[in-house]
Amino acid sequence: GQQLNQSPQSMFIQEGEDVSMNCTSSSIFNTWLWYKQDPGEGPVLLIALYKAGELTSNGRLTAQFGITRKDSFLNISASIPSDVGIYFCAGQLDRGSTLGRLYFGRGTQLTVWP
Amino acid sequence: DAMVIQNPRYQVTQFGKPVTLSCSQTLNHNVMYWYQQKSSQAPKLLFHYYDKDFNNEADTPDNFQSRRPNTSFCFLDIRSPGLGDAAMYLCATSRERFGQFFGPGTRLTVL
């Protein structure tokens, strides 16, 4: 199956710093998604990307769908304590029996020091 | 607000005692998914319904079954829970290929 490599595995930053994380795949995806998960809660969809080259922002978050369709990155600007959590990338296919199936990265654990 | 609801949020069961987890959605999405998530790992897909069509992942144990009586509801049945089935169980929905929306999860403890 498709393997997603998400890096870094963990980040320790100071409040106010910018954050960047990325995801690469050996296979092409039609959709890239970025989720944030707080302890004991389900993942929350942050940004969805549907087109190669697409750059989308959601507040302080910016994500891009790579031109090759095999990668995506997520940037968080001016981090704040509530940004703490695990960030997952996910690639999605939209054809055949794999319709809608997500392939997840291993997650990036973000810690923000005040 | 349109949402995905999971009940209960916390479930404790005994080894071998059947348990049912429920999920409901007000998003009117045609696809519903069940995931298992263990500590420090990404969610692992167990199965999904595309409308009424059931799709089982090849490595999902027979111990896990699902029912979707209508568009809004989906159930996860664990027939004989083992200690290794203790995990967070997540329900998600989507409309066709567009992004999946997750519920808050049910934390299952097996004693």
Image: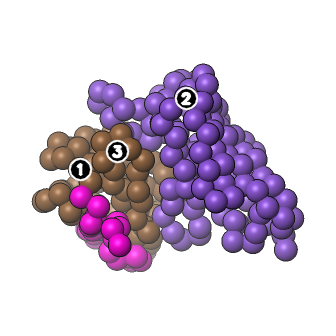
Chain letter for mark 3 = B
**Residues indicated by labels 2 and 3 sit on the same polypeptide chain:** no
* Disc 1 crowd, CA 10 A, few/some/many (<14, 14-19, 20+): some
Residue B82 in view: no
Residue B60 — which label? 3
Q: How is the image coloured?
A: by chain
Query: Magenta stretch: residue B9 in it?
Result: yes
Provide residue A84's location: percent of width, then percent of height.
70, 66
Label 3 or label 1, whichever lies nearer to me, is 1
Q: Which residues are magenta?
A: B1-28
| Residue drawn at x 46%, y 30% as measured from the top left | A30
Give whichever of A33, A103 is nearer the camera: A33
Tally of numbered tags = 3
| Residue drawn at x 42%, y 47% as measured from the top left | B99
Provide residue B102's location: percent of width, then percent of height.
42, 59
Q: Amino acid at mark 3?
A: Thr
